[in-house]
Amino acid sequence: MHLVNPAWTLLEAAKIGYKNVTWPKQYISAKVQIERNIEREKQMLATAKSSLSYEQITAAFEG
């Protein structure tokens, strides 16, 4: 995958919370945004998991 997306390793490191990565100069400006988006996704997933039961989810997709 890293041949298609040169920042893939950086993105995956950010997803698992690995901080001991040297970001190349051209990617520094995106680092904060990537970390913010990952945190937002985690919060949304946690909210979704705690809010809906399996029955509610299946009912939403069936109806």
Image (cartoon, rainbow, N blue to C red):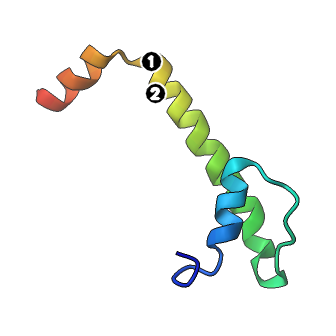
* Disc 2 secondary structure class: helix
Mark 2 Cα within 10 Å, few/some/many (few <14, many 20+)?
Answer: few
- Label annotation for residue 63: none
Seen at 63% across and 81% down, the residue is 6
Left/right placement of residue 55 relative to residue 47 reads left
Q: Is residue 21 left or right of residue 31?
A: right
The residue wearing badge 1 is 51
Q: Quadrant of the C terminus?
A: top left
Which residue extends farthest left? 63
Q: Amino acid at mark 2?
A: Ala
- Determine which quarter of the picture holds residue 30: bottom right
Task: Out of 12 and 44, give the one closest to the viewer.
Answer: 12
Q: Position of residue 53 (x, y in %)?
A: 35, 15
Look at the picture and state if 30 lies above or below 18.
Answer: below
The residue at 63%/50% (across/down) is 38
Q: Is residue 9 above or below residue 54?
A: below
Is 24 located above or below residue 32 in the figure? below
Query: What kind of residue is marked 1?
Result: Ser
Pick the residue in front: 23 or 3: 3
Residue 31 at what x, y percent from top left?
76, 65
User: How far is mark 1 from mark 2, CA to CA?
Assistant: 5 Å
Q: x, y percentage for residue 60? A: 21, 26
SS under mark 1? helix
Number of residues whose C-alpha sits closer than 10 Å to that of mark 1, classed few (under 14), some (14–19) or many (20 or more): few
Which residue is depicted at the point 63% across and 53% down?
A: 37
**Corner quadrant of residue 28:** bottom right
**Residue marked by disc 2:** 48
Looking at the picture, does residue 46 appear above or below residue 42?
above
Q: Do the CB atoms of the residues marked 1 and 2 lie less than 8 Å apart? A: yes
